[in-house]
Amino acid sequence: MGVEEAVAAAFRSDWGRIVATLIRTTGDWDLAEECAQDAFARALETWPDGAPDKPGAWLTTVARNRALDRLRRAGVEAAKLREVALLPAPEVPPADESGIADDRLRLLFTCCHPALPLEARVALTLRTLTGLTTAEIARALLTSEPTMAKRLVRAKHKIRAAGIPYRVPPSEALPERLDGVLAVVYLLFNEGYAASTGDVLVRRNLCDEAIRLASLLVRSMPHSETFGLAALLLLQHSRRAARVAVDGRLVTLDRQDRSQWDQEAIADGLALLARADGDGPYALQARIAAGHAVAPTADDTDWRRISELYATLLAVTGSPVVALNRAVAVGMADGPEAGLRLVEEIESSGNLTDYHLLPAVKGDLLECSGRADEARSSYERALGMATNELDRDHLRRRVAALGSADPLVVRRLRDV
Amino acid sequence: MKYLMLVCGDENGDFSGVDLDPTAWVEEMTARGAREDGHRLAPTSTATTVRRRGTEVLVSDGPFAETKEQVGGFDIIEAADLDEAIEIASKHPVARIGTIEIRPFWDQ
């Protein structure tokens, strides 16, 4: 392993821990980030002459000494300096009242505090725990660097000025706050997974970081939903190589080359899922993802089980988007007419009126029932609502294929 | 840390059947050393807004902004951190029907 790779590996494994520990001991977020940065810069300079045996401990010591220097120069009193100097080795951090020892968890709960705006929670988590630069975060979240810098400064200022505590919440507040943390980790993953725009490498990085945060949570907070989220992320991530075509187009589930699915990630995801014993939204979504992951071909998919899982998920979340997904699954399990009935229920409920996938799904189900004319007007309605060029292109091809005598063409284009 | 709690709600709303008496809350928070001071305020129909621009003092009737909910009272609390302040505010009876804004005191 070359020096740069060694430093990069240490960065991935130790950045968050070093920043988190320095924030706890100094109370100064900027100082913590800057001293961690200095330590990694020093590593790049000095490791070519011989890398240390314990890179994490080396980096912690360098960062701590740097912080001591700067605090001393700033005239900080002796008691505070002692606290920083006694900063423990990363292996033995003290436990707080929640019994949780890892400083990164304190940092994660602080970054995800509900008193911060949601977008700031995501950005702050990325900056402090994963060490992405402000420019990288701005690119990943599709905003400008000055906007992102301002958002981070504001969030750190609020933490200090409003007295947001640096700790894992006590057990009575934990379930609620853990939900908030899981939501941020999920959002972070989706930012990397969902959009097709933006810097591909940075986006891939977001998914990896979200998975690492989820495994950190699994180790220290073994709740059903934590396992569910970690499993869900791994199962979705296992399809990453198959879901984008050479031309950049997204490939839908039924047309993906399943030999490209990452079997190791699937196995890890299934093992985590086995430990999720509740019916929370992440566990349910992970079970749905697992239903796809274990099907050798799209035709082997157990749509009955998936439609039942969607029904439970709908009961838990009440989300109309889940209701639409359920309609698709029921259409696959019980035939298009049954799916259509559910789509019509959603329509008459007045939900999703601006959502192009509602008429798109309806068009598909109508087409499968042999009602080509109605399918056409549904697709055209969807076209009028879709803003994404990939979606529009797809819908145009569906309209063009309508009435085609070749069922294979229809089949190839079917991918709702 | 010191925080100001602005206790807000719709002063024209009908809350008959909801017990909004803060006496028990005041007693509990005072006993635990969390509440230092506070009071209910007369309705916004009694409010007067004052501005001085140059040498001119501008006085007008009413609150500084028309909002759906109005400040109906305040409390000054001492809490270890924002989580404790949130816990204290969430127990105030008005939190069930109105909104409580927590503002830290300006720190030099």
Image (spheres, helix red, strand yellow):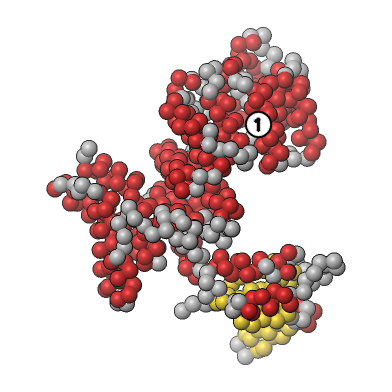
At horizontal 74% and vertical 40% (from top left) the residue drawn is: A351
Image quadrant holding the N terminus of chain A, namely top left
Residue A264: x and y in percent read 42, 28
From the viewer's side, name the closer residue of A246 and A50. A50
Amino acid marked by disc 1? Leu
Mark 1 — on which chain does it sit?
A
Image quadrant holding the C terminus of chain A, namely top right
Placement of B101 over or under A301, stated as above or below: below
> How many tags in the picture?
1
At horizontal 57% and vertical 49% (from top left) the residue drawn is: A179
Figure quadrant of residue A265: top left
Residue A205: x and y in percent read 41, 41
Q: Is residue A355 visible?
A: no
Dot 1 corresponds to which residue? A309
At horizontal 81% and vertical 67% (from top left) the residue drawn is: B18
B6 left or right of A293?
right
Badge 1 crowding class, 10 Å Cα cut-off, few under 14, some 14 to 19, many 20 or more, is many
